[in-house]
Image: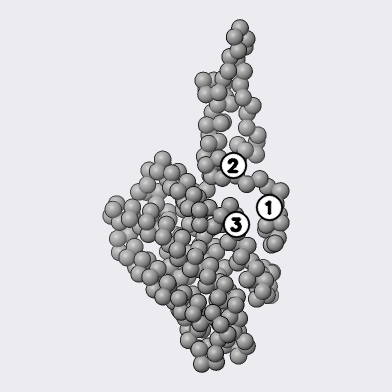
Amino acid sequence: MSDEARDNRGTPSVRRRELLSLPVALACGTAALTACGTTRPAGGAATHPPAPSAEQAQEVPVTPSEDLMREHGVLKRVLLIYREGIRRINAGEAVPARPLHAGAGIIRTFIEEYHERLEERYVFPRLVKAGKLTDTVPILVRQHQRGRVLTGRILDATARPTPQQARRDLAADLAAFIRMYEPHEAREDTVVFPAMRDVIPPKEFIQMAETFEDEEHRRFGAAGFTGVVEQVADIEKTLGIYDLSQFTPRV
């Protein structure tokens, strides 16, 4: 178990639909909206349900764009795993086939079959329909398609110990994936996802958050995103790149 998971063990799991209901709970706890939750016993004074705690009042629901951006964090961490694979190959070390295969498996199931499908089904069509980013969206879709080809080759190459003659091709595919997805995700984070608010009404934005969460737990169980992050952390530990401090330069 990673340090992040250990730190969160004492924190109760709160689903987004529970967070989205907090504004109603807050309203019901005020005198101005007594009709929300006021009970009035016969012949007695009106009573109110207890007001939410300060901690509950500070909870903010995860928005669809935030959801997609944090999933990009998973992608970034797998790109670091790919970089370590390239470093070892170029240094003449043994190919870390199993960690690379596990990382590519996360790319396939979490990024390509889940995250990108959400973008292609719910985000890109709304932007194109509104006449926004009509030049950018087709490029992003094409890059999704090319990425799936590269992932298939990486999975095949790392399914067993990589023969000497295949090392160069594997390193090239890993590098091509990194080269494409770094600008890809940066463009989505800074241009595409902010544009979602311009074309999706607030009520639909909240409903989309619920849709994303339901799909996340349907595919990845109760742990959802957190469970996937744990898998990535385990791969990083196997490769010796989990300790964040090692990336701090000496200046």
- Given residues 154 and 176, the one toward you in this image is 154
Question: Can residue 175 be spotted in the picture?
Answer: no
Which secondary structure lies at badge 3? Answer: helix
Q: Is residue 27 above or below residue 38?
A: below
The residue under the point 60% across, 62% down is 229
**Mark 3: which amino acid?**
Thr
Q: Earlier in the sequence, mark 2 or mark 3?
A: 2
On residue 226, the disc is 3
Q: Picture coordinates of residue 52 (x, y %)?
A: 62, 32
Between label 2 and label 3, give the one nearer the viewer. 3
Between label 1 and label 2, give the one nearer the viewer. 1
The residue under the point 46% across, 74% down is 151
Which secondary structure lies at badge 1? Answer: helix
Tag 1–tag 3 contact (CB < 8 Å): yes
Q: How far apart in space, not on screen, are marks 1 and 3 (Cα)?
A: 10 Å
**Mark 2: which amino acid?**
Glu
Figure quadrant of residue 238: bottom right
Q: Earlier in the sequence, mark 1 or mark 3?
A: 1
- Given residues 219 and 2, the one toward you in this image is 219
Residue wearing tag 2:
59
The residue under the point 36% across, 66% down is 141
Q: Picture coordinates of residue 131 (x, y %)?
A: 28, 55
The residue under the point 52% across, 39% down is 20
Residue wearing tag 1:
8
